[in-house]
Image (tube, rainbow, N blue to C red):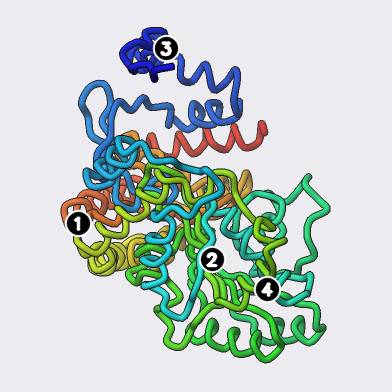
């Protein structure tokens, strides 16, 4: 039977479907998906309708542009619809490859693994999955198998994913509540080497998993901590897992964030998000030869850990194109220089605004933390927000950034007075100028102690108290 031409499939027209039903987007989510998402978006005024996107910008139906300082939680490292990634995906679809036969060795996974490992030459092999949480799950399984031990250590306030294994090393109780029992685990404070050594002495620790910079709150590991932790772990025959799902692929101004500290060579490294090019989900777990040989110890165990869609041709093509763009356009260097420009410009405002407590981060991963003001004029409003729910002031800043200045940002975590900036790694001085000018305007407004911004704050308080 001849393969039908796409033109013969007149029953499905994506453009027509979107034209006819696109306006129902919020109603469809409320009815069939997570009903709290549209409710939350309506409450904070984020229920926008974006028509198209390119690079670091969205446009609405009126043609107004919005600056994206969120990058899809870090997925859009190269911005949206990069032409090189688009062409690679067109090419791989047009090639009509015999993909996912499960019983062959196609070239694209090997080529992407080879390229990824060139950025971490102390590592030897790669497992490809479909997401960041799956990359962490893989690392946890491999560490337990390789060491023969059950327990994994992690840092308080960590975020490593939301599937059952990665949730076991998630430091936020709000995510864990209602899903016990989880894997055996123990949390330690970031930087607490004494606590790490105390747990290692028990002899049942397989690994310590750590984000070089925590996404929740944007907290960097203290200088020397990763190297000292690595030495302790290896002395006790345990492994160091670097979760680079958000910090990797250039985000912090190095290809991997752990490379900022000399002598750190993790046993397993988790990668995802930006590796996708913003199109096809892909996760990767890089590791040492002996670990992979422990897991895949015989032909009988050839499929002991696998993923149905892992190593699919579209994801591999997107990954290869992404890494080519990273090199050709010097994206890592841009993240370093533009990130330093943005961080330093914002840090210069700390002395100007009493509500602005600290600006921290590395590369284009920046945390803006707010704190209790000194003046009596502002203390009452701050106390009102804190009494209702910690984190409302940061949300009060995020909303006018979008509504007044058309800049999309995020609060860095529940109950945190921190805004996290993780824009596309391709932004430049123009975007820095726009953000700093907008942020300055919002801070000026906040320091008046009255007006529309504080009126919105009172609305947030009512919502928080209403549950």
Near mark 2 (Cα within 10 A), the count class, few <14, some 14-19 or many ≥20, is: many
Depth-wise, is mark 3 or mark 1 nearer the camera? 3
Name the spot of residue 183 as percent of width and height, x first: 78, 60
- Relative to 463, say whether 368 is above or below: below
- Looking at marks 2 and 1 on the same chain, the residue that comes earlier in the sequence is marked by 2
Name the spot of residue 43 as percent of width and height, x first: 51, 29
Q: CA distance from mark 3 to mark 1?
A: 37 Å
For mark 1, what is the residue?
Answer: 428
Pointers 2 and 1 in contact (CB under 8 A)? no
Name the spot of residue 424 as percent of width and height, x first: 31, 52
For mark 4, what is the residue?
Answer: 294
Look at the numbered disc 1 and give the secondary structure of its residue: loop
- Looking at marks 2 and 3 on the same chain, the residue that comes earlier in the sequence is marked by 3
- Looking at marks 4 and 1 on the same chain, the residue that comes earlier in the sequence is marked by 4
Depth-wise, is mark 2 or mark 1 nearer the camera? 2
- Seen at 60% across and 90% down, the residue is 231
| Side of 459 relative to 201 (left or right) | left
Depth-wise, is mark 4 or mark 3 nearer the camera? 4
For mark 3, what is the residue?
Answer: 21
């Amino acid at each position: 039977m001849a393969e039908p031409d796409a033109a013969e499939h007149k029953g499905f027209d994506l453009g027509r479907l979107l034209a006819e039903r696109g306006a129902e987007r919020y109603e469809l989510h409320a009815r069939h998906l997570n009903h709290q998402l549209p409710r939350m978006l309506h409450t904070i005024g984020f229920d926008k309708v974006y028509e198209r996107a390119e690079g670091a910008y969205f446009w609405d139906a009126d043609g107004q542009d919005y600056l994206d300082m969120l990058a899809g939680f870090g997925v859009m490292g190269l911005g949206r619809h990069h032409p090189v990634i688009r062409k690679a995906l067109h090419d791989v679809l047009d090639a009509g490859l015999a993909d996912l036969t499960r019983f062959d060795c196609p070239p694209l996974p090997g080529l992407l693994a080879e390229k990824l490992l060139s950025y971490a030459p102390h590592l030897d092999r790669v497992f490809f999955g479909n997401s960041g949480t799956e990359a962490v799950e893989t690392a946890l399984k491999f560490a337990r198998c390789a060491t023969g031990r059950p327990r994994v250590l992690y840092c308080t306030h960590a975020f490593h994913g939301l599937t059952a294994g990665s949730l076991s090393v998630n430091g936020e109780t709000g995510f864990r509540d209602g899903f016990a029992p989880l894997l055996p685990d123990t949390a330690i404070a970031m930087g607490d080497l004494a606590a790490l050594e105390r747990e290692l002495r028990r002899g049942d620790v397989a690994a310590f998993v750590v984000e070089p910079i925590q996404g929740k709150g944007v907290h960097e590991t203290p200088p020397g901590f990763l190297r000292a932790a690595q030495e302790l772990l290896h002395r006790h025959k345990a492994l160091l897992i670097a979760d680079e799902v958000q910090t990797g692929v250039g985000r912090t101004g190095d290809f991997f964030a752990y490379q900022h500290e000399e002598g750190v060579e993790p046993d397993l490294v988790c990668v995802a998000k930006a590796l996708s090019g913003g199109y096809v989900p892909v996760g990767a777990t890089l590791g040492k030869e002996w670990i992979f040989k422990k897991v895949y110890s015989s032909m009988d165990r050839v499929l002991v850990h696998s993923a149905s869609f892992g190593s699919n041709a579209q994801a591999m093509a997107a990954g290869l194109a992404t890494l080519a763009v990273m090199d050709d356009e010097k994206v890592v260097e841009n993240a370093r220089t533009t990130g330093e420009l943005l961080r330093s410009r914002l840090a210069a405002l700390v002395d100007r605004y009493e509500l602005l407590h600290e600006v921290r981060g590395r590369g284009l991963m920046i945390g803006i933390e707010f704190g209790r003001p000194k003046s009596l004029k502002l203390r009452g409003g701050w106390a009102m927000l804190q009494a209702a729910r910690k984190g409302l002031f940061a949300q009060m800043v995020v909303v006018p950034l979008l509504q007044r200045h058309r800049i999309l940002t995020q609060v860095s975590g529940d109950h945190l007075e921190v805004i996290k900036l993780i824009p596309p790694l391709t932004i430049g001085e123009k975007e820095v100028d726009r953000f700093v000018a907008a942020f300055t305007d919002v801070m000026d407004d906040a320091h008046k102690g009255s007006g529309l911004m504080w009126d919105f704050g009172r609305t947030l308080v009512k919502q928080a108290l209403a549950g």
